[in-house]
Each structure stands twice: as structure tokens, then as C-alpha cells.
Image: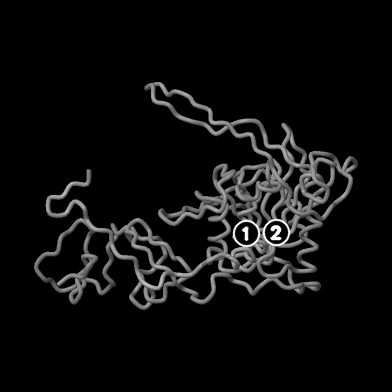
């Protein structure tokens, strides 16, 4: 008699994977049965029903393709590995800092951010393996993710994920490293993320994912130019990180930082701002492939914005570093009051179904 994986249940005996079960024979060597050709995740035990019941999320995926450990089956409990953000004026150990981005693991901005923060704590770098700009808060659930060790330009260790910035942060908090983090820093992004940009930005979304996992976070971006110098952005990152670690952030809060493309001497200081308004001039560009089938690019000139005093856009165009608080609670408070004045009464009875005009040979025309 065999189980669902083809192993003998009562009379185990070692055999090659290619052999089929034959007539019962006494075991020659007393060792656990193995099935070498099973495509299991190395080092991971086959989950029993107790573990399956403990999962916080279930997905009907083929186990042979690699089942997701959604919600952290081994741990149970909340998704985050650390308590909610709180002020930490005195550290008895070095803070653990997670650095990520959306431009990819080979980005110079990622390396600059890592180097700026490594004097403040133990830095771990996890980033997408390719450019994931403007993917927003995309999370990969319908295929497995692969994590690879990488070497950055300074020779230090990093990890790449074949997914989005959100995926990079998510796997870090779901148990890949076996510990949590005290701060997440996303960037340094090539190009500013001002105003409405945050709804598209993979960089800001990575910081949002950290906040969802109850960890304080900030995103930092720099105005784009051909050969960027990230010196000023690195200085800004250390100031922001130090303030967060010393002062703390409340639940649901993160900070969005935008740095002008100027030198330290040219910078006019740091300004705490609100979100501004972006003005987009996107264009649909149609092309033709060699088979004569049209395809499309979303292109156009770079976005501009409304330079209203007090906004992030106004600060950056005036050579100031914009520090903008963001909250995950997107409730429209003003509209909330208006909606409460509208009529929301349900009907007292379900409406009668409309007669079927086509029944019994009738015509609808």
C-alpha cells in the first residue's frame, strides 16, 4: 500500500526514484524512505495537516510549483516581527535597517543609501532584481518568488527578488531573515516622487509595506539628471533616519523625502511640507511590430506641478529638501461629512422581477 507521494506506507525500503513498487521484500538497510525526484523546496519539511490548519491564508496552488507560506505558518500571530513604532531615544543594540528600492539591486542610488546608513545600524539590502519603477503597491501572489544573493559594487552582500519592491519588503518581514527590522529606508530613487507621484511609486509603496508590517519607514527620491550625485541625498537620509529612530513614528505613518538636484552648498535647507499637485502630460505612442501588429507606449514629457508655497513641489523647485508626512488612512474627511447627508435608505422590499417578454414564444422586438 502506498501513500499519495508514492512511498510504501507499511514496508519502507530504499529504492531508486525510477523503480516502481514490486513484490514485498524485507528491508536491507533500516533507513527512512526517500523520493529523490519530488520537487520540494530544499530543507523544508512536508507540511502536515496541523501546519495547514495554522495557515492564515490558503491558496489553491500546485504544491509541486512551490506553495506560498502566506502569513507565516511557522510563527502564527501577526505578520510583523516587531512591535508598533515607538520612540527609541536610547539604543542598547545597533538598529536593524532594511534598505530597498524600485530601480533594482544594481542601482547606484541603492548603494548610496546603504552606505549612508550603515554607520547608524546593521543594514540589510533587499531589492528587485530588475527596474520596477511605477509599479505601485503591486504584490506577487500567483507565482513563486526567487531570492538570490548578490554582490554590490562595494563588495558587500545584498539580496535580489524577482518581484516588486513590495515583495522585497514583504518577504523580509514574513520570516526570510528570521528577525524583524527597526527601520525601512526605500531609495534613493532616480527622479522625484512629488504629490500624486506617490500613487504610482514603487519606492513609496515599499515604505508603505513596511508601515503595514508595523515598522517605521521613509522613502527618499532625488530629482533626475544624467549623472546624479547622491551626496546630498545621503546626508538627507541620515538626518531623516536619525530623527525617526530617536523620535519614532505612530502607526500608519511614513515620511516621503524629495531632494533637489543640487550640491550641499547650493541647497537652501530642509522644509517640512504637504503633498502638492502634479501635472501630467502623458501621451499614447503607437508603433508597429515587424508583423504589422500595433503596440503602444505610454510616453510624453516629464510631469510638472503647481508650485504652491508649503508643498513638496514648491520646496524642491526652490532648492530645498522636502520632508512630507504620509498617512495610510486615505479617508476623505470632507467627503465623509457630505456622504452622511445623502440618501442611503434601502428599499423595504425587493423589486419585482421584470416579466420575461421572450417566454412562451413571445418576441422582444
Rendering coords of residue 133 (x, y %)? 59, 43
The reply to whether callout 2 and callout 1 are in contact (CB within 8 Å) is yes
Q: Quadrant of residue 144?
A: bottom left
Pointer 2 local density, CA inside 10 Å: few below 14, some 14–19, many at least 20: some
Tell me the residue that label 2 is attached to. 326
Secondary structure of the residue carrying tag 2 is strand
**Residue 294 located left or right of residue 110:** left
Q: Which sits in the foreground, 112 or 328? A: 328
Question: Which numbered marker is on residue 263?
Answer: none
Query: Mark 2 or 1 closer to N-term?
Result: 1
Q: Which sits in the foreground, 314 or 184? A: 314
Rendering coords of residue 28 (x, y %)? 20, 71
Q: Quadrant of residue 12?
A: bottom left
Q: Which sits in the foreground, 324 or 106? A: 324
Question: Can you say whether 49 is above or below 133 in the image?
Answer: below
Rendering coords of residue 22 (x, y %)? 11, 65
- Separation of residues labelled 2 and 1 (CA atoms): 9 Å
Tell me the residue that label 1 is attached to. 208
Q: Residue at x 74, y 71 (%)?
A: 93
Rendering coords of residue 76 (x, y %)? 49, 76
Question: Can you say whether 73 is above or below 37 in the image?
Answer: below
Q: In the picture, which quadrant includes the C terminus?
A: top left
Q: How many callouts does the rendering have?
A: 2
**Residue 175 located left or right of residue 233:** left
Q: Residue furthest left?
A: 23
Q: Residue at x 69, y 43 (%)?
A: 278
Q: In the picture, which quadrant includes the N terminus?
A: bottom left
Question: Can you say whether 120 is above or below 13 in the image?
Answer: above
Amino acid at each position: 500500500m502506498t501513500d499519495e507521494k508514492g512511498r510504501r506506507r507499511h514496508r519502507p525500503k530504499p529504492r531508486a526514484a525510477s523503480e516502481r513498487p514490486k513484490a514485498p521484500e524485507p528491508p536491507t538497510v533500516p533507513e527512512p524512505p526517500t523520493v529523490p525526484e519530488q520537487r520540494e523546496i530544499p530543507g523544508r519539511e512536508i507540511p502536515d495537516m496541523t501546519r495547514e490548519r495554522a495557515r492564515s491564508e490558503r491558496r489553491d496552488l500546485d504544491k509541486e510549483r512551490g506553495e506560498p507560506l502566506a502569513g507565516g505558518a511557522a510563527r502564527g500571530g501577526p505578520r510583523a516581527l516587531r512591535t508598533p513604532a515607538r520612540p527609541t531615544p536610547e539604543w542598547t543594540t545597533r538598529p536593524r535597517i532594511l534598505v530597498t528600492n524600485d530601480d533594482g539591486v544594481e542601482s547606484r542610488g541603492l548603494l548610496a543609501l546603504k552606505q549612508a546608513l550603515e554607520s547608524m545600524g546593521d543594514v540589510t539590502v533587499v531589492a528587485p532584481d530588475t527596474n520596477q519603477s511605477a509599479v505601485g503597491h503591486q504584490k506577487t501572489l500567483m507565482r513563486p518568488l526567487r531570492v538570490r544573493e548578490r554582490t554590490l559594487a562595494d563588495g558587500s552582500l545584498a539580496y535580489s527578488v524577482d518581484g516588486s519592491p513590495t515583495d522585497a519588503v514583504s518577504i523580509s518581514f514574513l520570516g526570510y531573515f528570521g528577525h524583524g527590522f527597526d527601520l525601512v529606508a526605500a531609495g534613493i530613487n532616480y527622479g522625484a516622487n512629488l504629490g500624486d507621484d506617490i500613487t504610482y511609486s514603487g519606492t513609496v509603496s515599499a515604505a508603505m509595506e513596511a508601515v503595514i508590517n508595523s515598522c517605521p519607514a521613509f522613502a527618499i527620491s532625488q530629482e533626475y539628471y544624467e549623472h546624479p550625485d547622491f551626496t546630498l541625498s545621503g546626508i538627507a537620509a541620515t538626518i531623516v533616519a536619525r530623527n525617526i529612530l530617536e523620535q519614532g513614528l505612530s502607526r500608519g505613518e511614513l515620511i516621503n523625502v524629495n531632494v533637489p538636484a543640487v550640491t550641499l552648498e547650493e541647497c537652501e535647507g530642509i522644509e517640512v511640507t504637504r503633498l502638492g499637485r502634479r501635472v501630467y502630460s502623458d501621451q499614447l505612442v503607437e508603433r508597429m511590430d515587424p508583423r504589422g501588429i500595433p503596440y503602444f507606449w505610454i510616453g510624453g514629457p516629464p510631469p510638472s506641478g503647481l508650485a504652491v508655497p508649503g508643498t513638496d513641489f514648491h520646496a524642491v523647485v526652490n532648492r530645498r529638501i522636502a520632508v512630507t508626512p504620509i498617512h495610510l488612512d486615505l479617508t476623505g474627511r470632507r467627503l465623509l461629512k457630505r456622504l452622511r447627508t445623502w440618501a442611503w435608505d434601502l428599499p423595504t422590499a425587493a423589486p419585482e422581477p421584470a416579466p420575461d417578454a421572450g417566454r412562451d414564444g413571445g418576441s422582444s422586438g
